[in-house]
Amino acid sequence: MSNNKLWKVLLASPVLLGMGLAGSAQAQVSTVDELVDVSPTPDNWAYGALQSLVEDYGCIEGDLGTRTYRGNQFMTRYEFAAGLNACLDSIRFLIADGGIDAETLETIQRLQEQFAAELATLRGRVDALEVETAELRAQQFSTTTKLRGQVDANLAVPFDGDVGAQDNTAFTARARLNFDASFTGDDRLRVRLQAGDDDFGILNNAGGLANSTDGNLDVEIDDFYYSFGVGDNLDFIIAANSIVTDDFVVSTIVPFDGPSVADPGGPALYDFDMGGGGFAIGGSVGLGDNFVIDAGYSADQGGSGSNDPSDGGITGAASQSYIVQGSYISDGLIDAAILYARGNAGQSLGENDDNDFTDTFAGLLNLDFGNFFVAGTVAFHDNGDDDDFSWMAGAGLQDLVFEGSEFGVYYADLPDYGDNDPQMVEAYLGIPVSQFLTITPAIIYGDLNEGADTDQWYGALRATFSF
């Protein structure tokens, strides 16, 4: 090959790989036809140059997962220098075999001299990164464990001033520290420390506020479980506490779960009359790309619980819950699920055991139209002689007013075997102030039969710090 041809070949190759694209695995290409985005068409004007680099010099790599070259991607002189250096390394093998003529050797020498400064700078950056990496490894918390935390602070203000004992402004807070360890890369051992101070006086019949817990800010181990995968489509979880019903499923489908300030955004059907909270075991199986079946069982803790061999134990705990859910999760319009759950919420089992359990049959649906979604649930709850029907429906907008924000509004007809017929409406707007802080103002109306007046209006503000 002449020196002019080599020079044109090198300049025509926008990314002389060997350096690879950031975050992607690279594989050596034996023929240019292996790259699906390179073909001898007018749009691929550099096809001949790439073909020569692959076949004559063997110094082109493609993305391992997609078999693409991505030749239109912009690059810096440092990236060009790194790629050129990788290509020249391949050429050195040809020189050793006597496959390079004198003119080409002169061109190679000139290119090395022209990019010597960039290569030296690049080597310096690599050396500095190696030093920083070594320092981080020496100072890191653990080689296997990551520390994650979240703090939620809730301010709730009653509007109407006539809700009995709940006519005062209240403040609640919850803090969590998650220690997540992984030993294989496909597993997680979680130990969570949690403290909170909510007495559930706010929206009591609706389950209270979403990101809250009771107590006097006493630190407790809230989550203690190990999850792991088997093959590509099976996942299992074994827990000592806190894993119940919706904790077993890959998705609760409705987008209100998480962003909502009130607990019924959860949605409430997962929690109504369910038991458990001690020993738990469950699993998920993937069926193709979009279907998942989840199942789980949870027993209670404490007296007559899963840890009491004399009265209860794993299979005879006073409080138990079961769940089976089939979900369709897509990247497009429809996410949907159907579920069956069974629980007894801590009643003492008597002669009519079946009447102590509640059977819940439910369907969940979310229609995602891009920045707009419509979602809801329906559920039937059967407790032997009693039954109830509950549902929720709502809609939301992404990026409303603020980039990354989410606005949602939903109505929830809550399950209740009595005559209260609790109902609730919430409108919220989650605003990401930064990657560590989200502010969520909300307006909540409830007809929950609490206090002196059944109608309750709240203005709420939640601040969520996460790291």
Image: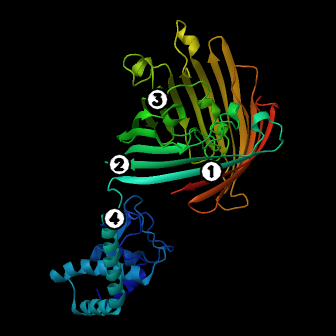
Residue that badge 1 annotates: 153
Earlier-in-chain disc, 1 versus 4: 4
Marks 1 and 4 sit apart, C-alpha to C-alpha, by 31 Å
| SS category of the residue bearing label 3 | strand
Which residue position holds label 4? 139
| Residue 129 pos. (x, y %) | 35, 74
Outermost residue toward the top in this view? 351
Residue at (40, 61) in percent of width and height:
67
> Marks 2 and 3, Cα distance to the nearest angstrom?
22 Å
Please determine whether, in this image, residue 148 is positioned above or below residue 329: below
Q: CA distance from mark 3 to mark 1?
A: 31 Å
Residue type at the position of mark 4: Gln
For marks 2 and 3 on the same chain, the one whose residue lies earlier in the sequence: 2
The amino acid sitting under disc 1 is: Ala
The mark found on residue 182 in the picture is: 2
Q: Is 258 positioned to the left or the right of 183 in the image?
A: right
Structural distance between the alpha carbons of marks 4 and 3: 39 Å
> Do the CB atoms of the residues marked 1 and 2 lie less than 8 Å apart?
no
Dot 4 falls on a residue whose secondary structure is: helix
Which mark is drawn over residue 296? 3
- Looking at the rendered image, the disc whose residue lies closer to the viewer, 3 or 1, is 1
